[in-house]
Amino acid sequence: MTAPPLWLLMPVKPPHRAKSRLRGLTGLRGSHEELVLAMAADTLAAALDAPGVAGVVAVTGDPVAARTLAALGARTFCTERHGSGLNAALDAAAARLRDRDAEVSLGVLPADLPALRSAELGAAIAHAGGRRGFCTDIAGTGTTLLLAGRGPLEPSYGPDSARRHARSATELRGPWPSVRADVDTPASWLLAAGLGLGPRSAALARHGLVST
């Protein structure tokens, strides 16, 4: 039997409000907003090339982010009229996709994985085998990849989301460091850089990777 198509929802905050702790980075080309969009673009490109991924929906209320990511191949879902908070926005986007195809397989991938490798994401998806599963961030407390299969999305993002997702999903463990390397701080940016940044993020880092 052919596996149902997997669509990943990628939430994207307005760039001027996102990743405030990265404002401590120095030696970068471009503005903070350009860095946030570059990370999202690199994440999107890797996800679209990953085995098993049919498409990516950028879930955002920011028109610049929506236009940027749509030009790179994402579908977009505007969050403005769908409740407050990340989880409500993801549920609304999931409902829209399920209205179009009740059998579609769904997942969530953050927009801050600038070192993401398509093969590693594909391996994590294959390991889940259509079951509900999730990957933690490197700290083990947050959630990077959430896979719901054909079941309800039930996102539970926020502080200590890994613990909450573990109540209904199996933790996916494997040699996929780039799937876990989300970037929130200068230290995690350096870690992602050590894995190898995507081209847009790397272009902004050519003048150094120094954190204050």
Image: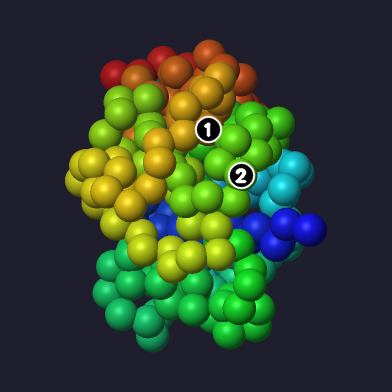
Instruction: State the scheme by which the image is colored.
Output: rainbow
Looking at the image, is 51 positioned above or below residue 59? above
Nearest the viewer among 16 and 157 is: 157
Amino acid identity at mark 1? Val
Label 2 crowd bin: few (<14), some (14–19), many (20+), radius 10 Å:
few
Residue at image point 54% right, 74% down: 77
What is the quadrant of the C terminus in the image?
top left
Residue extending furthest toward the right = 2
> Which residue is the site of mark 1?
179
Looking at the image, is 144 positioned above or below residue 96? above
Which percent across, then down, holds residue 109?
A: 51, 49
Which percent across, then down, holds residue 165?
A: 31, 48
Amino acid identity at mark 2? Gly
Kindly state the secondary structure of the residue where label 1 is placed. helix
What is the quadrant of the N terminus in the image?
bottom right
> Which label sits on residue 129?
2
Q: Is residue 106 left or right of residue 81?
A: right
Kindly state the secondary structure of the residue where label 2 is placed. loop
On the image, which quarter does residue 73 sit in? bottom right
Query: What is the distance, in whole Å, between disc 1 and disc 2 at their CAs?
Result: 17 Å
